[in-house]
Image (cartoon, rainbow, N blue to C red):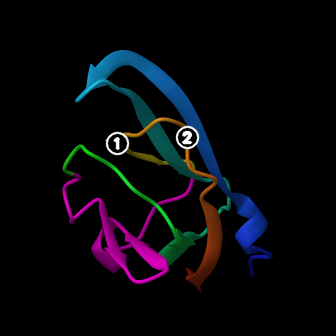
Amino acid sequence: YCKCTLADVKIIQTQTGKTVENKPEWKATVKNDCICTQSDLKLSCDGFQTVEAIDSSLMAKTGAECLINGGQPVASSSNLSFNYAWDTSFPFMPLSSQINCS
């Protein structure tokens, strides 16, 4: 039995120190602090922009949502990271996920 919520999904962002097309590069790390895996994890990303290509298997933007890890499970205590470049960091927020309890 697991008591997991979207609050167990953390997004940590740091500047990498690099620039892409004169914009600072950011590293966004999605962390699952839940004991269970979470799949079909979506973040709100309405208005998100980047001048750096992002591997769509890590983060795919569709409208106002971003699908993380291609919808595949994000394991407990695992980190999934992607880089993007824009003037400021983007306030990603967890929207939904499928919590997989075993």
Q: Among all residues in the image, which is located at the extreme front?
A: 22
Q: Quadrant of residue 88?
A: top right
Total numbered labels placed on residues in the image:
2
The relative height of residue 9 versus residue 80 in the rendered view (above or below) is: below
Q: Among all residues in the image, which is located at the extreme top?
A: 17
Q: Quadrant of residue 96?
A: bottom right
Magenta-colored stretch includes residue 70: yes
Q: Residue at x 55, y 40 (%)?
A: 89
Disc 2 is placed on an element classified as loop
Q: Which mark is residue 84?
A: 1
Task: Between residue 59 and residue 24, name the one nearer to us.
Answer: 24
Q: Residue at x 50, y 76 (%)?
A: 42
> Disc 2 marks which amino acid?
Ser
The relative height of residue 28 versus residue 19 in the rendered view (above or below) is: below
Residue 24 at x, y percent in the picture? 40, 25
Q: Residue at x 41, y 40 (%)?
A: 86
The relative height of residue 35 versus residue 30 in the rendered view (above or below) is: below
Q: Residues within 10 Å of mark 1 (few under 14, many from 20)?
A: many
Task: Between residue 42 and residue 51, name the one nearer to us.
Answer: 51
Whole-number angstrom distance, CA of label 1 to CA of label 2:
9 Å
Q: Which mark is residue 28?
A: none
Residue 45 at x, y percent in the picture? 52, 68
The quadrant the C terminus occupies is bottom right
Q: Residue at x 21, y 65 (%)?
A: 56
Task: Between residue 32 and residue 23, name the one nearer to us.
Answer: 23
Q: Residues within 10 Å of mark 2 (few under 14, many from 20)?
A: some
> Disc 1 marks which amino acid?
Tyr
The quadrant the N terminus occupies is bottom right
Is residue 101 among what the camera can see? no
Magenta highlight range? 54-76
The residue identified by callout 2 is 89
Magenta-colored stretch includes residue 24: no
